[in-house]
Image: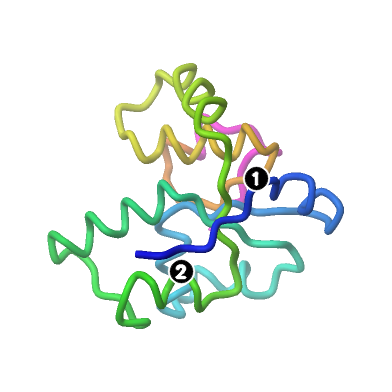
Amino acid sequence: MDVELVAGADEAAAAAGPVILLDTNALIWLEQGRPRARALERAHTRLYVSPASILELQFLLETSRIRLRAGTLQSLVSGGPWVVDDPPAANWFTKAIDIGWTRDPFDRLLVAHARLRGWRLATADTVLMSRLGPDERLEV
């Protein structure tokens, strides 16, 4: 799958104002038009997607645990009001090492991604909500 990634997105986003990194569920809810995502639809912020969410979505598709309205993962990635970010892998994974309170590799990578960029993570995950500070999360 060809995905256009945005390197250096942190500088561009800082100039554009507040930024939200969508966790995988927030991305799914936006894509499916769920009521939980309405606040994100109305938010005047830049929305970003992590490569970790793209991989998690691929796993969910392969195991038939999800169906996308967009039809394909490529259509979802390129068709929404979001941009796929491309954080430096070494820095991202180093940041993830410090997040030992979850055994979910995708949660760990998403939190590390958000912290690396200094962005808020849009999530409804109760574990993430309890571990992230108010300036690190956006409840959906």
Outermost residue to the left: 63
Seen in the picture, residue 72 relative to 120 is either above or below; the reply is: below
In this rendering, would 78 be left or right of 28?
A: right
- C-alpha gap between disc 2 and disc 1: 20 Å
* Residue 135 drawn in magenta: yes
Q: In percent of the image, x 68 and y 74: which residue is there?
A: 42
Residue 115, placed above or below residue 81: above
The numbered mark at residue 59 is none
Indicate which disc, 2 or 1, sits on the residue closer to the N terminus: 2
**Amino acid beneath label 2:** Val
Q: Is residue 136 magenta?
A: yes
State which region is magenta: 129-140
Report the residue at 25% width, 74% height from top.
67
Residue for point 58% across, 52% down: 85
Q: Which residue is mark 1?
A: 120
How crowded pointer 2 is (Cα within 10 Å; few <14, some 14-19, many 20+) is rated as: many
Picture coordinates of residue 98, whole percent (x, y): 49, 17
**SS state under label 1:** strand
Q: Is residue 45 left or right of residue 124?
A: right
Query: In the displayed structure, does residue 87 sit left or right of residue 31?
Result: right
Q: Residue beneath label 2, please?
A: 77
The answer to which quarter of the image holds residue 75 is bottom left
Residue 58 in the image: x percent, y percent?
Answer: 27, 59
User: How crowded is the residue under tag 1: few (<14 C-alpha within 10 Å), some, or many (20+)?
Assistant: many
Task: Tell me where residue 23 appears, x and y as whole percent.
Answer: 47, 52
Instruction: Kindly state the secondary structure of the residue where label 2 is placed.
Output: helix
Amino acid type indicated by mark 1? Arg
Q: Give the camera-side residue of 86 and 105.
A: 86
Q: Is residue 10 left or right of residue 114?
A: right
